[in-house]
Amino acid sequence: MINEGIVTKKQMAQSLGIEEETLDDILQLLVSRGMLRVNDCKQIDSTLCSSCAYSEGCSPEASTRMEYFVTEKGRRYAAQ
């Protein structure tokens, strides 16, 4: 999944066969362990979102978009 690029939480949850709420818990755990880092996109003006390289992975109805990036620690762990 690391190499899949941009996916929505819904797509990720479906791929893993879990509920989105469970995925939220897992994402927070991975952030707390330093395997993921978070970037909050606080861009509310959706007209500016169209120029964002990550716009396909965002949820347009959300006022704050969360982007998760795999850290080097997370990549090393996944490679084991």
Image (cartoon, rainbow, N blue to C red):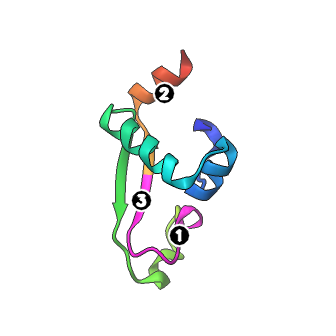
Measure the C-alpha gap from mark 1 to mark 2.
26 Å
Q: Which residue range is magenta in the image?
A: 55-67
Q: Quarter holding the N terminus?
A: top right
Measure the C-alpha gap from mark 1 to mark 3.
9 Å
Query: Label 2: few (<14), some or many (≥20) within 10 Å?
Result: few
Residue 30: in magenta span: no
Q: Amino acid at mark 3?
A: Met
Q: Which label is found at residue 75?
A: 2
Disc 1 and disc 3 in contact, CB within 8 angstroms: no
Upstream in sequence: badge 1 or badge 3: 1
Measure the C-alpha gap from mark 2 to mark 3.
20 Å
Q: Which label is found at residue 66?
A: 3
Which label sits in the foreground, 2 or 3? 3
Going 61% across and 58% down the picture, which residue do you hit? 10
Q: Amino acid at mark 2?
A: Arg
Query: Label 3: few (<14), some or many (≥20) within 10 Å?
Result: some
Q: Element type at marker 2?
A: helix
Going 61% across and 49% down the picture, which residue do you hit? 12
